[in-house]
Image (tube, grey):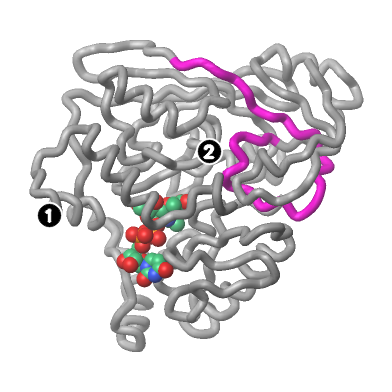
Amino acid sequence: MIVEQNVPLQAHNSFGIVAKARTLVRVAGEADVQQLLADPQLAASPKFVLGGGSNIVLTGDVKPVVLKVEVMGRRVLEDGPRATVIEAGAGENWHELVTWTLAQGFPGLENLALIPGCVGASPVQNIGAYGVELQDRFESLDAMDLATGRVFTLDAAQCAFGYRDSVFKHEAAQEGDFGLSGRAIILRVRLRLPKPWKPVLGYADLERKMNETGVRQPAAQQVYDWVCAIRSNKLPDPRVIGNAGSFFKNPTVSQDQCTDIIAREPGIVHYRMADGSVKLAAGWLIDACGWKGKSVGNAGVYDKQALVLVNRGGATGGEVVTLARAIQTSVYERFGIRLEPEPVVV
Ligand code: EPU
């Protein structure tokens, strides 16, 4: 185990915010965590698990001990008639895993191409795009309890997946409660890619690609290429412009609330869900309030997609948070809807 002090984190958060980890420990496997827990001082310190840093806003130096997840490895566990099961280390880059599975001839993750971040973060917020969520391909994961060092395995039901949500985003108020936030580190994730492969094409942007190209039965590689093109066109590349993807979740309202809002705002983009509720496009709400292209200090609203906040160069976490709060206030004042942030403010 190597313990580093005062480690710059700018390259380890996709917003590109300047901050330091007071203490950082790289975790390549179980042994590193076990050694850390054997050190009385480190064991007693609060801990913060850092993956690809694509869903955090750093508002200052990180005081808890940062566990930088670097568990690597990808392998095919099972290639049966009904599915291929693959396993990847939590530190693997998510997009590279998607690309690798396709190159191996195992389709199923193509709609989730180009999502920034690492494999270990994918179940935490149940990443999703273009009609597929991680939970649709999830088999199980191995994690380690940060208090006891015990390794445990969770299936999909135990992860309690929801829209951009899982057991890893909830804090347990008391022992035995639901909630693993801050209490566990994900080590490995297993994914089940069903056979025969069927493309997921219902999403409007993909239908547009089918109509434009005339390709009605795309191969997985074609869907992957389309998703990459759609995302590159709409979302800023974090290596060029710092950002954390969608900054807010798309809010859900009841059918009655939606009827009210539509009466006032007929243009509102909304999707009916299977349970009768209605999801509203947060990007549309923010855009309608005139936020596209606006800034607070060096933090701004991306000019091609109002749901994405960006670092225009040298932004602080405080500026990002101030901008986010101002957006929440104006969306609430106009529509009566509270937007919930997606990234974790640290
Ligand atoms: N819209 C506007 N103005 C904007 C932005 C969007 O009018 O500035 C409208 C669009 O025209 C569209 C609707 O809002 O009709 C929805 O926009 P889009 O299709 O771009 O999807 P989204 O709801 O903004 C969600 C996910 C993305 C995911 C895409 C594709 C959330 C919070 N975001 O975005 O996920 O890639 O759908 O499935 O659910 C992420 O979580 O970081 C992320 C990028």
Say which label, 1 or 2, has the lower sequence index.
2
Q: Nearer the viewer, residue 21 or 258?
A: 21
Q: Residue furthest right?
A: 41
Part of the protein shown in magenta: 49-74
**Distance from mark 1 CB to nearest ligand 1 atom below 8 Å:** no
Q: Residues within 10 Å of mark 2 (few under 14, many from 20)?
A: many
Which mark, by number, is residue 46? none
Which residue is pictured at 83% across the width and 23% down the height?
A: 3
Residue 30 point in image, percent of width and height: 66, 15
Q: Which residue is mark 1?
A: 211
Q: Secondary structure at mark 1?
A: helix
174 relative to 42 in the view: left or right: left
Res 140 → quadrant: top left
Which residue is pictured at 20% across the width and 46% down the height?
A: 201
Q: Nearer the viewer, residue 247 or 159?
A: 247
Q: Which residue is mark 2?
A: 117
Res 102 → quadrant: top left
* Camera sees residue 280: no
Q: Residues within 10 Å of mark 1 (few under 14, many from 20)?
A: few
Which residue is pictured at 74% across the width and 62% down the height?
A: 318
User: Does the magenta segment cover residue 69?
Assistant: yes
| Quarter of the N terminus within the rendering | top right
* Camera sees residue 62: yes
Residue 169 point in image, percent of width and height: 59, 44
Ligand 1: which quarter? bottom left
**Distance from mark 2 CB to nearest ligand 1 atom below 8 Å:** no
Q: Secondary structure at mark 2?
A: loop
Residue 160 point in image, percent of width and height: 47, 40
Q: Against 305, is 216 above or below?
A: above
Q: Against 246, is 337 above or below?
A: below
Gap between marks 1 and 2 measured at Cα: 31 Å
Label 2 sits on what residue type? Gly
